[in-house]
Image: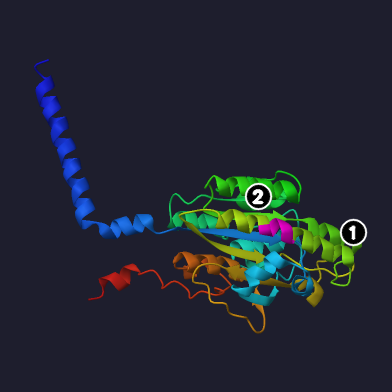
Amino acid sequence: MAHAAPMFSMFLKASLAALALASWAQAEGSGEADLLRSPIRKVLIIGIDGLRADAFRLADTPNLDSLKRDGALAAHAVTDVLARSGPGWTSVLTGVWSWKHGARDNAFTGYRAELYPNFMDRLADARPGTVAGAVVNWKPIGSNLFGRRGFWVAPGDDKAVTEEAERLIGKGIPDVLFVHFDGVDHAGHTFGFSPDDPFYMWAVEKIDGWVGRLTQAVRGRTGEEWLIIVTSDHGGNYRHHGENVPSDRIVFVLANGPGCRPERSEGFRGVVDVAPTVFAYLGIPVRPEWKWDGRPLGYDPAPPAMSLTDRQQP
Ligand SMILES: [Zn+2]
């Protein structure tokens, strides 16, 4: 018992110090309080597999149209020269083309994950504690691109994908979420990849409904502000794709978020613009050694990080 008093007083001193610190923070730290009140920036990337640029433009899609209206739109963006899902989604998610990332087929054969990881891994390095992951219809995206650090789930069809994404967003879990829909690609392989095919176009309109639900889910979150990006991995021609031809390679990139300029990109952009757009929105510099191939859409790039030699200059 005799030792209890000094122990208690030590505890009391520590508590008082904490109290003093807390009141100081209240009095002097209004900047910090503002920081706590300012919304958390989050990112939703919607990947619509197999959606040609012309069908994206012509389909009856009220939800996508409203994102286009006040967002930045590259109505023509090329996907990888290997216009298939493995290389295409790898280009979207690594920010480099297949001659660098190496993935050459739908088994992701040749993928150099160590050199060109999912850009969300780089994000988690820059901002520790970032929760990034994917809800996908096509499992190999999850296992090959999210298996190392992020979480991923493949709950089933596009409806199940929507419901799982809604659930995760509603619980406030992901900071960056990639959601993959496959219905348009399925329609293309069955009926034909063409804006003249009513079944292909119907599939685009169906996914617009899922997009609307995800948009509502993020808009319903308080204390968060979301960048929404929509893109595709390839187009198609007749009932197949994979050739280096315009029908297969021309897709689109759409970005809609706080501070995004509603620019209309003349000429071609690329699906590799997705990663730098996310980093620009989050204010994180892109490092030259990552060898990224794209540039931000609708945002200015974050200023480069100060290097050690910069700091040494007077
Ligand atoms: Zn396909």
The crowd level at tag 1 (other Cα within 10 Å; few <14, some 14-19, many 20+) is some
What secondary structure is found at the residue carrying circle 1?
A: helix
Q: Tell me, yes or no, if residue 117 can be seen here.
A: no
Tell me where residue 54 sits by quadrant.
Answer: bottom right
Q: Tell me, yes or no, if residue 17 can be seen here.
A: yes
Residue 303 in the image: above or below residue 132 = below
Tell me where residue 92 sits by quadrant.
Answer: bottom right
Tell me where residue 90 sits by quadrant.
Answer: bottom right
Q: Which residue is drawn at 77% across and 70% down?
A: 52
Residue tagged by mark 2?
Answer: 135
Mark positioned earlier in the residue sequence (1 or 2)? 2
The crowd level at tag 2 (other Cα within 10 Å; few <14, some 14-19, many 20+) is many
Q: Residue at x 74, y 45 (%)?
A: 156
Residue nearest the observer in this picture, 33 or 248: 33
* Disc 1 + disc 2, Cβ < 8 Å: no
Q: Which amino acid does label 1 sit on?
A: Thr
Say how the picture is coloured: rainbow
Residue 215 place in picture, x, y as percent: 62, 59
> What's drawn in magenta, residue-wise?
208-212
Q: What residue type is labelled 2?
A: Val
Residue tagged by mark 1?
Answer: 190
Residue 133 place in picture, x, y as percent: 58, 50
Look at the image and say whether residue 241 sits in the magenta stretch.
Answer: no
Look at the image and say whether residue 210 sits in the magenta stretch.
Answer: yes
Residue nearest the observer in this picture, 177 or 203: 203
What secondary structure is found at the residue carrying circle 2?
A: strand
Q: Main secondary structure of the magenta part?
A: helix
Considering every residue shown, the one lying at the far bottom of the view is 266
